[in-house]
Image (tube, coloured by chain):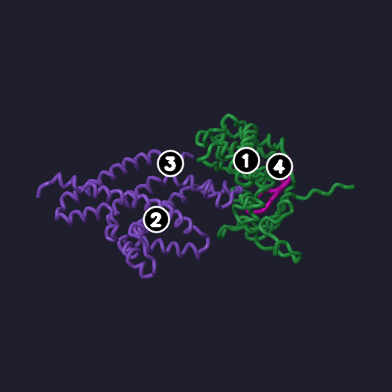
């Protein structure tokens, strides 16, 4: 018997998105395979962050389709799945169910400042998955251990450095065991000496789990080591994609070459 | 006119009865305006214009008309429509609704001050709309606005003499009635002023403490 060909975990099918007159995404299509580590690079305004925000349902789409795990994200079957097919816009309940599959880490951490570190992590599992406090705290301590922050469980976010906050934010997202993790420029707001501790956590995560990871980043060196595949975006489209070695050492497209040159000139390592 | 201490002691028990009612009206009015203000603030944010528009209009209407007129309306006009309320209940409803339209603005500012990233983090944590309000947004929005709310409660306290026009036996009304029976105004009215001043000053000290305690959430 042949093993069935693996299905993509994310299928993006010609989606478009505008903010007012500014078209951010223009008929974009791409697939992501389960367990894949993807780096999205490109100039600001190229639409890479918008893709993550759309996958997290923080922004809607104007047209097109997205399937997560074979299931429509922004649409659902008419008549509760009757045979005649046809799709209608997703209800809030549908979006809520689909969001279970996805977690996100933000550039500005967005920890809940009124809750201690451990409460930040246990809040969502207790509210959305009906976990008991004891279960949620056990899991939270495992995650804190993984991100090297077990000694800060009772601290408040305001007492932590940026790098520590971001590690907590990663633990918080992981607490819901999403199949897909989205990282939106997670080191951009950090002081340079704090970047490495966050990247180390992400390396560990990539090694120890088969979570699918999408990463928007300006850390080219990290993208090179971390990603299975790199996508270069410009003006809402994928200009070039390929293995990190090819994109970084041997970019074919002029726009990719120009972008990488600028990034290196600005002092980012490749 | 001479200050008469004997008269002061004689009317004191009556005035203290009035102070009690004044404080009860203020406390109940504060509770009601806290709830009404939150309800107005939340309903005004409703994406359904059929909800947000009438609520906005009603709030502007109440805020734009005098409390005194509203008290007359609740106590003397509503009975024509079959709604007969005891004086204190009518007074508390009047205070609560009127000040609720002001506290609604305090809530609005407090809610707007919570950064957008908090809403997004709540969504990424897959919280429902209700859970986002109760566990993320309001716990951050409310502490910084406690001093502003308390300020309105002190203002409300000083407006409770208006309730005398709808026969509530609060401090002012008691003072008026003893003054009218004895034809002496200097002691009762001075004492009314003294009572209000004392309680206001104590409240202001409390307010300063609240400001220190709940000034800002550290981020």
Q: Residues within 10 Å of mark 4 (few under 14, many from 20)?
A: some
Rounded to the nearest whole Å, what is the CA distance between mark 2 and mark 4?
A: 49 Å
Q: Is residue A234 visible?
A: no
Rounded to the nearest whole Å, what is the CA distance between mark 3 and mark 2?
A: 23 Å
Which chain letter goes with mark 2?
A: B
Q: Which residue is mark 3?
A: B216
Rounded to the nearest whole Å, what is the CA distance between mark 4 and mark 3?
A: 38 Å
Say which label, 1 or 4, has the lower sequence index. Answer: 1
Rounded to the nearest whole Å, what is the CA distance between mark 1 and mark 3?
A: 31 Å
Q: Is residue A70 visible?
A: yes
Which chain letter goes with mark 3?
A: B
> In the rendered structure, are the residues bearing label 3 and label 2 in contact, judged by CB atoms less than 8 Å apart?
no
SS class, disc 2: helix
To the question of a shared chain for discs 1 and 3, the answer is: no
Disc number at residue A211? 4
Q: In which image quadrant can residue A133 be found?
A: top right
Q: Residues within 10 Å of mark 2 (few under 14, many from 20)?
A: many
Q: Which residue is mark 1?
A: A132
User: Does residue A250 appear to the left or right of B204 in the view shown?
Assistant: right
Q: Nearer the viewer, mark 1 or mark 4?
A: 1
Q: Is residue A230 above or below residue B54?
A: above
Q: Is residue A235 above or below residue B80?
A: above
For image coordinates 12% across by 46% down, the residue present is B3
**Residue A147 point in image, percent of width and height:** 63, 33
- Which chain's colour is purple? B
């Amino acid at each position: 018997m042949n093993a069935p060909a693996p299905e993509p975990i994310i299928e993006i099918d010609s989606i478009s998105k505008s903010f007012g007159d500014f078209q951010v995404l223009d008929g974009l299509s791409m697939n992501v395979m389960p367990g894949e580590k993807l780096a999205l690079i490109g100039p600001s305004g190229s639409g890479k962050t918008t893709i993550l925000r759309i996958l997290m349902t923080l922004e809607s789409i104007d047209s097109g389709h997205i399937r997560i795990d074979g299931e429509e994200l922004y649409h659902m079957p008419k008549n509760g799945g009757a045979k005649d097919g046809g799709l209608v816009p997703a209800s809030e309940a549908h979006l809520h169910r689909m969001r279970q599959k996805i977690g996100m880490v933000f550039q500005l951490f967005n920890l809940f400042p009124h809750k201690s570190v451990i409460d930040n992590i246990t809040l969502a599992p207790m509210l959305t998955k009906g976990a008991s406090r004891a279960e949620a705290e056990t899991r939270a301590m495992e995650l804190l251990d993984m991100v090297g922050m077990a000694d800060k469980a009772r601290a408040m976010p305001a007492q932590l450095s940026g790098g520590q906050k971001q590690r907590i934010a990663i633990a918080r997202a992981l607490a819901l065991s999403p199949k897909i993790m989205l990282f939106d420029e997670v080191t951009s707001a950090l002081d340079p000496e704090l970047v490495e501790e966050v990247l180390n956590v992400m390396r560990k995560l990539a090694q120890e789990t088969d979570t699918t990871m999408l990463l928007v980043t300006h850390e080219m060196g990290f993208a090179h080591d971390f990603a299975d595949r790199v996508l270069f975006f410009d003006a809402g489209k994928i200009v070039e994609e390929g293995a990190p070695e090819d994109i970084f050492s041997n970019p074919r497209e002029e726009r990719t070459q120009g972008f990488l040159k600028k990034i290196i000139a600005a002092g980012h390592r490749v | 006119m001479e200050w008469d201490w004997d008269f002061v002691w004689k009317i004191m028990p009556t005035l203290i009865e009035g102070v009690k009612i004044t404080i009860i009206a203020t406390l109940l009015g504060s509770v009601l305006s806290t709830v009404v203000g939150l309800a107005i603030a939340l309903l005004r944010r409703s994406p359904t214009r059929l909800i947000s528009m009438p609520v906005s209009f009603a709030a502007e209407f109440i805020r734009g008309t005098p409390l005194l007129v509203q008290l007359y309306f609740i106590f003397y006009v509503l009975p024509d429509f079959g709604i007969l309320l005891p004086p204190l209940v009518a007074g508390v409803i009047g205070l609560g609704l009127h000040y609720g339209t002001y506290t609604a603005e305090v809530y609005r500012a407090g809610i707007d001050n919570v950064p957008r990233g908090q809403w997004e983090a709540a969504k990424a944590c897959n919280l429902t709309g209700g859970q986002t309000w109760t566990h993320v947004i309001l716990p951050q929005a409310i502490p910084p606005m406690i001093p502003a709310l308390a300020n309105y409660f002190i203002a409300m306290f000083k407006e409770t003499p208006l309730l005398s026009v709808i026969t509530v036996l609060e401090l002012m009304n008691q003072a008026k009635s003893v003054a009218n029976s004895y034809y002496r105004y200097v002691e009762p009215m001075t004492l009314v002023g003294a009572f209000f001043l004392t309680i206001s000053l104590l409240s202001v000290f409390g307010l300063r403490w609240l400001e220190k305690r709940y000034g800002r959430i550290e981020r």
